[in-house]
Image (cartoon, helix red, strand yellow):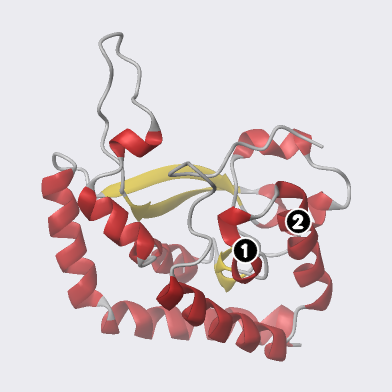
Amino acid sequence: MYKQVFKRLFDFLIALVALIVLSPIFIIVTILLFVANQGKPFFFQLRPGKGEKIFKIVKFKTMNDRKDSDGNLLHDSERLTAVGAFVRKTSLDEIPQLINVLKGDMSLIGPRPLLPQYLPLYSETQKKRHEMRPGITGWAQVNGRNAISWQQKFEYDVYYIEHVSVLLDLKIVFLTISKVFKSEGINAADSATTEAFKGN
């Protein structure tokens, strides 16, 4: 009953209240990133959701669009702005995804939505991560986030799908708050972003 009905109801109500409470921070960060990123405070990208249905995720844009002399984007670490680094370190870049939760694209808790090009690379077991709405945070995020291997992430994702409950969700909420304050596992080693998944 929780997984089928109440989880979605809680997602909507909590996301609505959170957006209202966090609206001053939302506005301030939007203004700062608007200035830092030449008028582009938001980052939009297609991601697969429940049932592999594609939706458009929205996050705060933490990297600018600087390019080298050949017109190629510079390395992620070179494009990460000072404001963006702070927003990412404090996980404020996730706030706009509350809009995705309200729309029903995402849940507050679930496997993180990855890139569409990864879909053909999953094993049958790993594909289970799409049996539920993706989340802003999840079991993999509180167990290492970007600092663990893809294999470990997928194992945590599948574990969550198979064991979802009110108690597990509450545990993830409290662990997420702890991780945010400690700024643990945000980036992979020596990179502003995690390494791309290349298959099993």
Disc 2 secondary structure class = helix
- Image location (x, y in percent) of residue 128: 81, 57
Q: In the displayed structure, would residue 53 be above or below residue 68?
A: below
Q: Quadrant of the C terminus?
A: top right
**Residue at 71% in and 39% down:** 119
| Quarter of the figure with residue 54 | top right
> Is the Cβ of the residue at disc 1 closer than 8 Å to that at disc 2?
yes
The residue positioned farthest toward the top in the image shown: 70
Q: Give the mark nearest the N terminus, 1 or 2.
A: 1
Residue corresponding to mark 2: 152
Q: CA distance from mark 1 to mark 2?
A: 9 Å
Residue corresponding to mark 1: 144
Specify the amino acid type for callout 2. Answer: Gln
Specify the amino acid type for callout 1. Answer: Gly
Q: Quadrant of the N terminus?
A: bottom right
- Can residue 130 be seen in this snapshot? no
- Left or right: 103 as drawn, with respect to 31: right
**Residue at 70% in and 49% down:** 149
Instruction: Check residue 21 in the rendering and tell me which mark sits there, or answer none.
Output: none
- Image location (x, y in percent) of residue 174: 55, 86
Residues 62 and 180: in front is 180
- Can residue 82 be seen in this snapshot? yes
- Image location (x, y in percent) of residue 161: 78, 69
Q: Residues within 10 Å of mark 2 (few under 14, many from 20)?
A: few
| Quarter of the figure with residue 32 | bottom left
